[in-house]
Amino acid sequence: MMEFFQQLPHLEPYGNPQYFVYVIAATLPIFIGLFFKKRFAWYEVLVSLFFIITMLVGGKTNQLAALGIYLCWEILLLLFYKHYRKSKDGKWVFYLVSFLSLLPIIFVKVQPAINGTQSLLGFLGISYLTFRSVGIIIELRDGVIKDFTLWEFLRFLLFMPTFSSGPIDRFKRFNENYQTIPERDELMNMLEESVRYIMWGFLYKFILAHVLGETLLPPLKNLALQSGGFFNPYALAVMYTFGLELFFDFAGYSMFALAISNLMGIRSP
């Protein structure tokens, strides 16, 4: 099985225009089904799994294995705390479960600082998945969520459009949104929003971020190194240019995620 995954191509999420051809073609049947008040649940699963797997592989399967370990860990924690919360509400148990839920990302972030190597538990999207898992624990503690199925948990955690780049969502809001299929007028508005989000995303990521990072930043770095001195205006320019590049790159990712979420019938916040 792992050899099969190794042969799959790597698709960077929202990384190039070709990716949008694939993802729009794959999600279009889902959007059409919503027009007829139908959710193709198993097709959604296949689409999500395909794009998640291809964003994590590319000759190696270590990220895919890390995702599997992470899911098993979080499922055990969430099922335990859900069962515990039905009869008890100890704050120290809440603190412990929250800490244990954060443990994988703590290892991923701390290990490079300790021994200079990347953690085997790391994979693309672990930060956003951790936010979602901890969010469910908090909602269980607050009584916002009374119960959920394993299927609902995995559907929320592995929602493909926002898997790698957010935005962060809450389980209760997502689940209610998923279970309520929008009317046709609202679906048309969501389609219009998707087109607009994609256009803005292309402007932010593929034009503004590219110009800032590839055209302006390299000469500014050279000027900053050549000038030196205690106060270096070119170093200040490098700082702001790099910051703006990161901003527009991330803003572009967010626009793309919102667009594809709409095509799957979910208005991500």
Image (cartoon, helix red, strand yellow):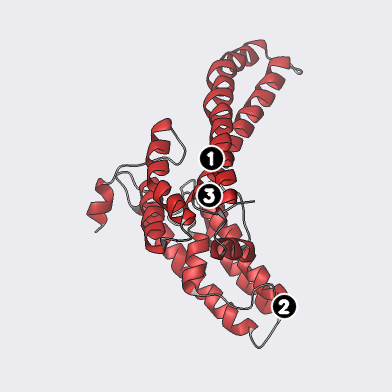
Q: Which is in the foreground here, disc 2 or disc 1?
A: 1
Quarter of the rendering occupied by the N terminus? bottom left
Image location of residue 180, percent across then percent down = 57, 63
Inspect the image, locate mark 1, and give the three-letter code of the amino acid beneath it. Answer: Phe
Q: Is residue 245 visible?
A: yes
x%, y% of residue 184?
Answer: 55, 52
The residue that appears at 33% across and 52% down in the rendered structure is 61
Q: Which residue is mark 3?
A: 261
Q: Which mark is residue 256?
A: 1
Task: In the rendered structure, find residue 74 and report the number of the disc placed on it.
Answer: none
In the rendered view, would you say 94 is above or below 34? below
* Kind of residue at disc 2: Lys
Which circle's residue, 3 or 2, is located before the other in the chain? 2
* Residue 65 visible from this viewpoint: no
Local packing at callout 2 (Cα closer than 10 Å; few below 14, some 14-19, many 20+) is: few
Q: First in sequence, mark 2 or 1: give its number.
A: 2
| Residue at x 26%, y 56% (from the top left corner) | 2
Cα distance in 3D space between marks 3 and 2: 35 Å
Mark 1 Cα-neighbour bin, 10 Å: few <14, some 14–19, many ≥20: many
Residue 206 x %, y %: 52, 27
The residue labelled by disc 2 is 91
- On screen, residue 223 above or below 171: above
Q: Tag 1 or tag 3, which sits nearer the N-term?
A: 1
**Left or right of 54 in this view: 153:** right
Q: Quadrant of residue 12?
A: top left
Asked which secondary structure carries label 3, the reply is helix
- Asked if the residue under mark 2 is in contact with the one under mark 3, i.e. CB atoms within 8 Å, the reply is no
Q: Position of residue 148 (x, y in %)?
A: 55, 75
267 vs 9, nearest the viewer: 267
